Image (spheres, rainbow, N blue to C red):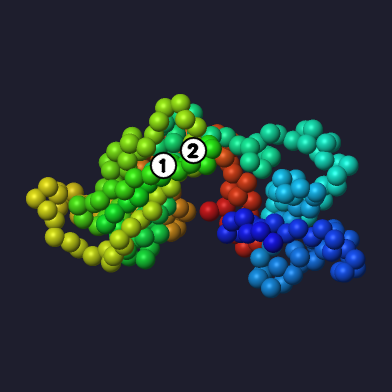
Amino acid sequence: MEEYSLDEAFADITGLRRPLRSSYEAIARKIKIEIQRDTGLTVSVGLSLTKVMAKVGSKHRKPDGLTVIPGRAIASYLQDLQMEKIWGIGLAATDADYLFAQLLRTLESACLKARRYKLAPRRLAFFLKTNNFLYHGCEVCLNRPSACTMELSDPTREAFLTLFRKGIYYRATGVVLMEMGADLPVQYSLFDNPVRADKVRSLYEAMDKIGSRFGKHTLRLGGSHLIEVAGKGKRGAATVREATQFFGETKR
């Protein structure tokens, strides 16, 4: 067994047909059924000779499918498959504005969760992940704790300009909220604008109410709007998750 991510794993079932008295497809189907029975969650399973092809198969019939790709069918299966559908091959960002929009959207999501728990960070850590899986990061100290993205957009832009290098391909952005504490009224410094800060806090209270009714990121910073224009998946197409509704879910 190999844990690949929070909700993905690989299992090498080579040689288990005889002790389990089942075909490989039957073993994969039983794993799928038992996961749903024990957790109540549906899973998508891919079965093939290699991890790459198993991963490709697992994405073929989401969210509750089983795809078997035998060795003799690999060539014909890959023949008409789009290249970005193959595990490990995908799009990377050649555009700075789009990459910054992704970083800002990541920060928006993190701050949204912090506000939900009435917490605010005193420090922020940012990182960009390059196409060859190297990480470049930096930290930013705040004048006062805040979980309002509008107040954090300037230090986010400064951090991004420190990390971004033209000509390098990037595959991911990340934000870590640090030194979290209760989001309580604080003593403003001489350099703060108390009136503006109070207005921003009231604005985000209203935004969170709207978001809880109509969906996350219904209202968002203009700096992250490029994601909506250029697309979150294939630069314009909805992601598979956005296009898939699970039992009991609505479009929101």
Labels 2 and 1: the sequence-earlier one: 2
Q: Position of residue 75 (x, y in %)?
A: 83, 36
| Residue type, numbered disc 2 | Thr
Q: Verify CB contact (< 8 Å) between mark 2 and mark 1.
A: yes
Residue 136 is marked as 1
| Residue at point 64%, 51% (across, down) | 244
Residue 130 is marked as 2
Looking at the image, residue 48 lies above or below residue 129: below
Q: Which of the image's four quarters has the N terminus?
A: bottom right
Q: Residue furthest left?
A: 190
Residue 36 is marked as none
| Residue type, numbered disc 1 | His
**Quadrant of residue 25 in the image?**
bottom right
| Residue at point 58%, 48% (across, down) | 242
Q: Position of residue 200 (x, y in %)?
A: 25, 51
Q: Residue furthest top?
A: 167
Please give left or right for residue 90 compared with residue 100 in the image: right
**Quadrant of residue 177 in the image?**
bottom left
Looking at the image, residue 149 lies above or below residue 43: above
| Residue at point 50%, 32% (across, down) | 169
